Image (spheres, rainbow, N blue to C red):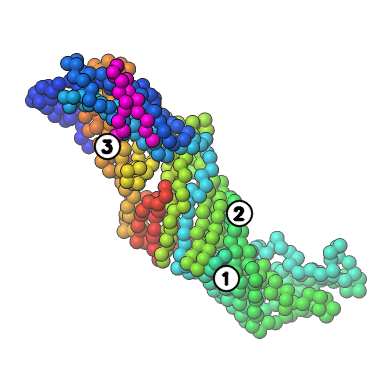
Amino acid sequence: MRSFAFATGALALAACAGGPKDLAPPPTVVVTSPARSLVQNSAGSITVTGTATPNDDGTPIANVMVNNVAATVNPDGSFTASIEVEPGASLIRTVATDTAGGVANDTRSVEAGELRPPGSNIASAITASVSANGFTKISGIATTMIKQQDFGALLAPLQPMVHNGDESGPDCLYDQVFVDNLTFSDANISLVPVAGGLQFSAEIDGLDVPAHVNFAAACVNGSDTLEVTADKVIVTGTLSVTPNGMNGFTTTLNNPNVALTNFQLDAGGIPGEILNMIDMNNAIAGIIESGAEKFMGPMMNTALGSLAGDHQLAALGKNIDFAVAPSAVTFDDNGGTISLDTSFLIEGAESSPGYIFTDNGNPALDPGQGLELALADDLANEALAQITALDMLKLSMSVPGGSFDSIAITATSAPMISADPSDGQLKLFLPDMKLTFLQGTTPVADAALNATVALAIVPAANGTAVSVQLGTPTVYIDVLNDIPNNTHLEDNDLASAVKLSLDGQIATISALLGTIPLPSIAGITLRQVSVEGSEGYVCVKATIL
């Protein structure tokens, strides 16, 4: 990390060499509108106005360009230009050039789009596409889970699972079957994506279902036990999976079919009249269907929706409340796609101005043989807006050895991740950050800093993680006239000193971002990670092992 002391010496030597001193003074440009840190509730046209005046030698102004659009310049030096701004963050760069080649610049930020309050729901903030191979892996997880499931507790809310003749309450002829437990020696589950759902198949070996029956025959009440066993049970059907808000997912087994091998019924002393009413062969099929359907809901929530619901975590010294709710699920022969709505609020940011939301479109996802996740940039932008409102982006850079010993940096509007209109690449925008140069506690100059930093999200840790890398920043610094410049440095040298210090800060931020581990889904390991951008999303693609 380079220090300002080194930079000051280099700048001083350059100043003594004479070259820049021989240059004619540049013209002056003052932008009067729009104001710095403009946050506009819609994209589109913006009118830029100001004045461009000659230098002390009177060298005439040749032209004024605003974002490469020629401004109309009046004889008194006032100018007007109309430019278009895209949704997201962008910079307005005004350049006045005189006939001798002298140049004066002004750079300021604009954030345009829909302004949303803090904690707003971000629709489809996360989209996940899971391949058919991924559901094969999830089938293995389901097989492990079903062997560990306590079906007695799972079926308890459904009791009595079979009943006849008790529509108006127990009477002279009725039965109620209460399943006490459901156990088996082995099981295997298969989930294959098809249009409209998952083709479900469960093979269960060594089924044992103990139960008890309350009944009445000829107005004589009774109660007894029964037990159903089968060597093998095969359950098939189409499992539909639908969003259930912050409860995760709801599953329904459509067109179920249950086949039992070597079905045995031990009915004890239950009267035949009651057994005929119960029809245990069909009853056990219904019990198995209900058990499978009841099990698959929590299983799918574990596999695909473990984040669903309200949560709180501690980070950055604050409590963060966030909520995730599945909003859409679709299936075809290649796999399934799940969209998750997300909202979050950092403690203390309730009264922040909000953040700029930009439409993301629909990410083009191709999970291949694995999984692809798409994360909307609005997630990061809402977080940056709330962090800014909490004054967590106030920085201080120490620069000993010069005419000032520190620079206080204050964000006047939230940094924003946005796609650059020229190339579509994601960039981090630092908009109109206020720089105050201090000698001790005394301000000796101030400036506005605008910067764009290219973002690269690359695989890391042998493909088990991603790393967020910040490139070399493109920095624009305007020395302001709010207070006199008492640093004994020319404006250009002062700007150069800040650029050198900012380079060090960017390197530090990059190191802090480091490596971000990829989450596992139902214990599935992700490998061979690749990253790309699509429609305002960062898409992370991985093979499932």
Name the kind of residue labelled 3 in the image.
Answer: Thr
Per the image, the residue denoted by label 3 is: 474
Between the residue at mark 1 and the residue at mark 2, the CA separation in whole angstroms equals 20 Å
Tell me the SS state at disc 1: strand
Q: Residue at x 52, y 30 (%)?
A: 351
Residue 126 visible somewhere in the drawing: yes
Number of the label disc, if any, that sits on residue 244: 2
Number of numbered discs on residues: 3
Residue 73 is inside the magenta segment: yes
Location of residue 231 by image quarter: bottom right
Between the residue at mark 1 and the residue at mark 3, the CA separation in whole angstroms equals 55 Å
**Principal secondary structure, stretch drawn in magenta:** strand
Q: Residue at x 32, y 26 (%)?
A: 72
**Magenta range:** 68-84
Per the image, the residue denoted by label 1 is: 200
Q: Residue at x 20, y 22 (%)?
A: 26
Circle 2 crowding by C-alpha within 10 Å: few under 14, some 14–19, many from 20: some
Number of the label disc, if any, that sits on residue 344: none
Q: Residue at x 33, y 55 (%)?
A: 459
> Looking at the image, which is closer to me, 87 or 124?
87
